[in-house]
Image (spheres, grey):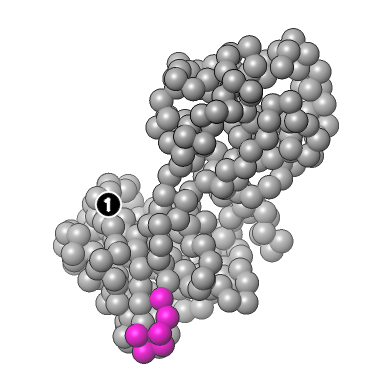
Amino acid sequence: MNRLALPVLLALAACAGPAEGPLKGVLVVFSEGTEQGIDDFVDGLQLRVETVTSEAVFDFSFAELSRFEGTLRDRRTILFVVDSPGEIPVHLDQGADGIYRGRDVWAEGQYVFGAVPGSVDPADLSAALEAAYDDHMWNYVYGSFVSTQMSSPERIDSLAALGFTVDVPKSYFLESWRPGDGFVQYQRQPSEDCLLMFSIQWAPGVPSPDAEDAVLRREAMARRFFYDARADSVDRSAVTAEPVTFHGAQGYRLTGVWRNPEHLNAGAFTSLVLDCRGTGYILDLEVYNPGREKEPYIREGWMIMDSFVPED
C-alpha cells in the first residue's frame, strides 16, 4: 500500500459514520509478507477469561491488505499486521513500544493499530487491543442503550446517602432496596434467556478479607439475599482471587462460577470484596446466560465496579 495515497482517506473520515461490528471484534489486515505466520502471531495476542469455560477475549477476523475496502473500514478495531513500516497507513503514529496507533481513521469511535511482527512485544499489543475493547464497552454500557443517554445521577445520589457511590447505568432496574440490611440489587435482562444481577452489600466492622474469606462472603451474600438461592455455592475449583487495592480499600477481585444444585443451573460471576476503613463491601455481578458467552457481561461488571467510590 502506498502511504502517500492514504491522506485522501483522512478527508473522507471527517464525514464518516460510527464504527460498527462486535465490541470485542478485531479485524486483522495482513499483507502478503505476513500471511504465512499470521495465525501464530494472532494466537500470541489472544487473552482469556475463566468463566464457566475458558473464554477468548477477542474475536479475530481477517482480510488481505489488497482487499481492505468498503465496509471493512468501518470496523471498531482494526489491526494492520504487515511486513514493513511502509505498509502502515500514514495517519497512524508509532509509539515508543513500536506499535502504530490511530483514532477515528475511517469511522467515528474507531481504534486502528499497526505492527510489524518481530518489532513489538505481543503483551503490549494485547494490552492496547484490550484497552480499545474496554473503551468500546464503556461507551456501550453508559452511552449506547436505547434507554440510556448517560449514567444516572439520580442513582448516584440515592446511593450517596448510604455512604458510597456507584455509577449504575439506567439500563439496570432496581430489584431490591434494603439499606437497613446493607443490600441493594439492580438487574438487566439483555435477552429472554439472559439475566444480569448487580448487587452491593456493605457492613461495618468487617476485617480485611483473605482469599478464602472473600469467597465465603460472596457465597453468604448470594444465599441470604438472592431470590431462591439458599443452595447457591461458589465452585472452589473454578474461581480466581486477585488481590486489589481500590480507592485505598484492600481486598480481592473474584471471578468464577456459581452453582445451584436445587435448580440444576449455574453461571459466572465477578466480585470486588473490600475492606475500606472498617466497612466491608461486596460489589458483585452475577451472569445467567446458559450455553452462551459470559465474558462481555463480566467485563460490563468490571466497568460498573470501577465507578465505585466509598465515602471519603
Prevalent SS, magenta region: loop
Residue 193 in the figure: left or right of residue 98? right
Q: How many marks?
A: 1
Occupied quadrant, residue 213? bottom left
Quadrant including the N terminus: top right
Residue 186 visible to the viewer: no
Report x, y in % for residue 285.
43, 65
Report x, y in % for residue 70.
81, 35
Residue 254 in the figure: left or right of residue 173? left
Q: Nearer the viewer, residue 293 or 302?
A: 293
Name the residue located 45 percent from the left edge and 18 percent from the top edge. Answer: 119
Residue 242 in the figure: left or right of residue 34? left
Report x, y in % for residue 294.
49, 62
Name the residue located 63 percent from the left edge and 24 percent from the top edge. Answer: 31
Does residue 8 lie above or below 280 as drawn?
above
The magenta region covers 261-266
Does residue 235 lie above or below 40 as drawn?
below
Does residue 67 lie above or below 7 as drawn?
below
Residue receiving disc 1: 242
Q: Nearer the viewer, residue 69 or 67?
A: 67
Mark 1 is surrounded, within 10 Å at the Cα level, by few (under 14), some (14 to 19) or many (20 or more) other residues, namely few
> Amino acid under label 1?
Glu
Q: Is residue 141 magenta?
A: no
Q: Nearer the viewer, residue 42 or 249?
A: 42
Name the residue located 40 percent from the left edge and 32 percent from the top edge. Answer: 123
Residue 57 in the figure: left or right of residue 23? left
Q: Secondary structure at mark 1?
A: strand
Does residue 92 lie above or below 207 as drawn?
above
Report x, y in % for residue 26.
59, 40
Residue 223 visible to the viewer: yes
Q: Is residue 263 magenta?
A: yes
